[in-house]
Image: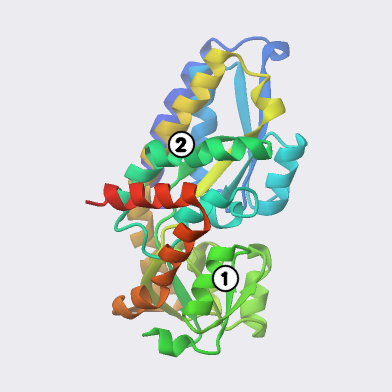
Amino acid sequence: MTTITRRLFGTLAATALATAFATAPALADRVTLRLNHNLPEISVTGQSFEFLAKRVAELTNGEVRIRVFHNGQLGQQRESIELVQQGALDMAKSNAAEMEAFEPLFAVFNIPYIFQSGEHAKAVLKGEVGQAVLDAAADNGLVGIGFLFEGARSFYTKKPIQSPADMVGLKMRVQPSPSAIRMVELLGAQPTPIAFGELYSALQQGVVDGAENSIGALTQVRHGEVSKHYSLNEHTMVPAVYFMSHAAWEKLSEEQKAAVRQAAQETFDIQFDAWAAEDAKERKAAEETLGVTFHDVDKAPFIAATAPMIKESKAASPEAAALIDQIVALAK
């Protein structure tokens, strides 16, 4: 994590923590929530959840505490979301790709090139579209709390990918998402769903030829040790999303619920601002420390190859069609 990013999170978090526990209630009056996610504590996402925890403590005067479990300590993404549904875990992070299995409307965020920029994604996720998709998960036993921006995802492999023609026949790891599978099929490769925690060894052993993720995957989980070419086709900007169980949510007072919502919005803003600096730092580390080569590519062939997904997604669901139209309108 860069010095600027660490300072940004650290200063705000320290202030929040000092304020919260200056007036903290007795232990018996506190609610402690366990939040699980699959990334390292040093990642922007990991630091964002630490900030969220401290900000919630501040806004509730220490009445609500969040204990963050990093690196998938309580399960990988799908498993932990299922635990939240069952009420066995209070909070968990997943992303829009894996969330398709729980609520199909999340697929609108996984359409290639649906977001024109990070600012476009931010406007969508913080606005009516983002809230509508979060709310849709309620019928599946999940209380949507907020999103995190996790940048653009691109392909990385053992050989350069300059166009979809270079992908033909390659086995590409994808998340267990119909949208991700369809995207890779349209690009001519063979989609291979593999859990994120198993991906390093799969790349190392040749079970798959490549994968797709943001730049941080090269350094934070060392995928750049076994995949030396990163092609900047930037096909998707799949957001992270986190939820609370209904049982945990109903333990909170209305004031505490409002505090959690407020902290989530503030966390999104600070995390969004930190992402660009962190991305640049991770690219430099991947190039200089791991020897990864970054390739600028013409995105037009990738856009053309995956264009049918918008029509297919709109045909599959009137609700999705309406949301897609709203997303496109916000880019103008």
Q: Residue 300, can we see it?
A: yes
Q: In this view, does 292 lie above or below 218?
A: below
**Residue 86: which quarter of the image?**
top right
Q: What residue type is labelled 2?
A: Gln
Give the colour scheme shown. rainbow
Q: Residue at x 51, y 53 (%)?
A: 317
Q: Which residue is drawn at 55% across and 17% down?
A: 256
Q: Residue 292, can we see it?
A: no
Q: Name the residue under label 2.
A: 131
Q: In this view, does 126 lie above or below 198?
A: above
Q: In the figure, is residue 236 to the left or right of 297?
A: right
Q: Residue 146 carries which label?
A: none
Q: Which of 316 and 293 is in front in this view?
A: 316
Q: Callout 2 environment at 10 Å: few (<14), some (14 to 19), or many (20+)? A: some
Element marked by disc 1 = helix
Image position, residue 255 (x, y; %): 53, 13
Q: Which residue is drawn at 47% across and 17% down?
A: 19
Q: Nearer the viewer, residue 273 or 291?
A: 273
Image position, residue 201 (x, y; %): 67, 75
Q: Distance between the residues labelled 2 and 1?
A: 26 Å
Q: In this view, does 108 lie above or below 305?
A: above
Image position, residue 191 (x, y; %): 59, 76
Q: Mark 1 points at which residue?
A: 181
Q: Residue at x 49, y 27 (%)?
A: 261
2 or 1: tag closer to the N-terminus? 2
Image position, residue 128 (x, y; %): 39, 36
